[in-house]
Image: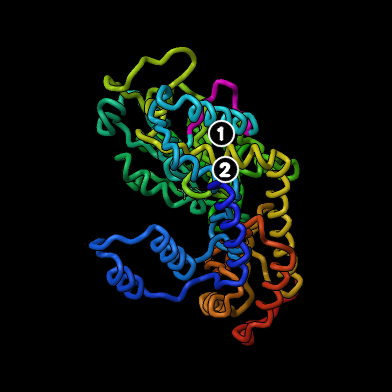
């Protein structure tokens, strides 16, 4: 059975990866000449032959983001259930543009999203959809918020809005909003960068000041983005205060919880997301801390009518009118033909249960705590404050890029550079549920013995 084969391949891969390099040493030329020499598609190959070659390429020529010592961007290790789900989806190829073609798939998604929507504390009438990722979910938020604030936007476009609309977020927010402002026709200058307090959270006083000033100057503020788990430093904006300000000021409150949203399942962590229940809309990625393969984002919105208005579409060639309490995803989301994205989250949730997810999330959080404490104990300075497993660290005189080069050369771990309040630092995020205590201890020991640290001073504990 295909599942048994997948299971054994999957387990073999996990074992092999432990021994394999975390990152590749390859040039584009090397890959291009390999492809050019083998694949002019003139002669047929057996499937086994191609698969073998492709697997070898993937083994050798990529950063192994599912490696337990990949402490990188929010790319997770994936569960077997989610891999099997993606395979099943490809085999049956359900079409999720409308309800009628794929009733089972549509209802499985609705069921899964409804469960998570309740966890976030959104009201029962809220609507949600699976997206390609956080970017599409954030784009959906901006389009829905725009449509809701400026009813003419849909028919007559941005130019019909007399005052230029403005979006408020911090420098720590995801930089994709610049692209979204570009794509929607708002223009990149519609983004207002609100100041942060010393702990990198949105400064409410500055938010209020900017909104008032923009209104005085004839702009049209309409949306505030609060981030729950910023990409660089894992910081959570003051969601209750932003929610309160948005309510008083008639602004749309979007919470971007692309990575951090999963913490809502954890009894230990969820209080850090308090205020998220007051969001007008939420972005949360399944392909980050829910540990399923890319691309699986989610968009939640408490105003189903606003969503229906933003994504309305008349189609004459789709068979059958909707009957009963169902909707066609193409009329409530950006995509048209769409893959059955939600099965991987459903299958993984069903297999592991909520408690399995809680264990996984809390394990990663505690590995983050261990990493943070071990680094501090050996003289590193941690620059960010977050309950989430993301640690930004440095020490006096550290050459961050040289340090990272050393880490990579010795295959100690994959980490990335970051700037925290203008200070260059190393960013390490526990993104794999397979990261163990001994992985963390090994990494810290090896880091501490790097010779490139000789010139950097050991500072006393923070
Ligand atoms: C990752 C991320 C995004 C973008 O999501 P993709 O899934 O990469 O499209 C947006 N916002 C935040 C806070 C993120 O961490």
Task: Indicate the quadrant containing the C terminus: top left, top right, bottom left or bottom right.
Answer: bottom right
Query: Quick check: is the Cβ at mark 2 less than 8 Å away from ligand 1?
Result: no
Element class at badge 1: helix
Above or below for 147 versus 256? above
* Residue 2 located left or right of residue 262: left
Viewer-proximal residue among 226 and 15: 15
Q: Residue at x 60, y 43 (%)?
A: 261
Overall secondary structure of the magenta section: loop
Residue at the spot x=38%, y=31% of the render? 146
Question: In the image, is residue 82 part of the stretch drawn in magenta?
Answer: no
Residue 430 rendering spot, x and y as whole percentages: 63, 59
Q: For numbered disc 2, what is the local secondary structure?
A: helix
Residue that appears at 74% across and 41% down? 267
Q: Which residue is mark 1?
A: 245
Contact between marks 2 and 1 (CB within 8 A): the answer is yes
Q: Which residues are magenta?
A: 120-129
x%, y% of residue 282? 53, 36
- Residue in the image at 27% along x and 22% along y: 317
The image shows residue 362, relative to residue 167, as above or below, that is below
Colour scheme in use: rainbow
Where residue 431 sits in the image (x, y, percent)? 60, 57
Q: Is residue 138 visible?
A: no
Q: Is residue 96 left or right of residue 280?
A: left
Pointer 1 local density, CA inside 10 Å: few below 14, some 14–19, many at least 20 = some
Q: Is ligand 1 closer than 8 angstroms to the Cβ of mark 1?
A: no
Q: Which residue is mark 2?
A: 204
């Amino acid at each position: 059975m295909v599942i048994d084969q997948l299971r054994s391949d999957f387990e073999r891969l996990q074992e092999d990866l432990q021994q394999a390099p975390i990152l590749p040493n390859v040039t584009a030329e090397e890959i291009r000449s390999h492809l050019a020499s083998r694949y002019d598609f003139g002669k047929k190959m057996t499937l086994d032959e191609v698969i073998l070659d492709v697997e070898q390429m993937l083994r050798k020529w990529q950063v192994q983001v599912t490696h337990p010592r990949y402490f990188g961007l929010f790319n997770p290790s994936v569960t077997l259930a989610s891999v099997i789900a993606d395979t099943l989806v490809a085999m049956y190829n359900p079409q999720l543009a409308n309800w009628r073609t794929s009733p089972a798939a549509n209802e499985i998604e609705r069921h899964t999203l409804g469960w998570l929507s309740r966890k976030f504390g959104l009201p029962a009438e809220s609507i949600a959809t699976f997206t390609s990722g956080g970017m599409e979910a954030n784009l959906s938020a901006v389009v829905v918020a725009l449509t809701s604030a400026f009813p003419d936007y849909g028919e007559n476009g941005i130019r019909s809005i007399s005052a230029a609309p403005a979006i408020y977020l911090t420098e720590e927010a995801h930089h994709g909003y610049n692209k979204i402002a570009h794509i929607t026709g708002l223009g990149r200058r519609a983004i207002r960068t609100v100041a942060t307090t010393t702990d990198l959270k949105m400064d409410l006083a500055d938010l209020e000041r900017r909104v008032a000033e923009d209104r005085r100057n004839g702009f049209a503020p309409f949306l505030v983005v609060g981030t729950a788990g910023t990409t660089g430093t894992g910081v959570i904006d003051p969601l209750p205060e932003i929610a309160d300000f948005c309510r008083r000021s008639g602004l749309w409150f979007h919470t971007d919880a692309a990575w951090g949203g999963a913490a809502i399942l954890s009894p230990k962590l969820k209080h850090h997301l308090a205020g998220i229940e007051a969001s007008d809309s939420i972005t949360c990625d399944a392909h980050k801390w829910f540990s399923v393969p890319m691309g699986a984002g989610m968009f939640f919105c408490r105003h189903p009518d606003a969503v229906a208005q933003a994504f309305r579409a008349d189609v004459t060639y789709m068979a059958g009118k909707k009957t009963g309490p169902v909707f066609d995803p193409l009329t409530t989301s950006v995509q048209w033909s769409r893959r059955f994205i939600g099965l991987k989250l459903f299958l993984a949730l069903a297999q592991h249960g909520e408690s399995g997810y809680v264990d996984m999330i809390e394990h990663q959080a505690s590995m983050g705590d261990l990493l943070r404490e071990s680094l501090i104990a050996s003289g590193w300075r941690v620059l960010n404050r977050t309950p989430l497993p993301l640690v930004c660290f440095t020490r006096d005189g550290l050459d961050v890029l040289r340090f990272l080069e050393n880490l990579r050369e010795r295959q100690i771990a994959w980490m990335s550079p970051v700037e925290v309040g203008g200070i260059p630092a190393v960013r390490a995020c526990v993104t794999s549920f397979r990261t163990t205590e001994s992985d963390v201890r090994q990494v810290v020991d090896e880091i501490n013995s790097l010779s490139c640290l000789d010139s950097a001073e050991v500072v006393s504990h923070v």
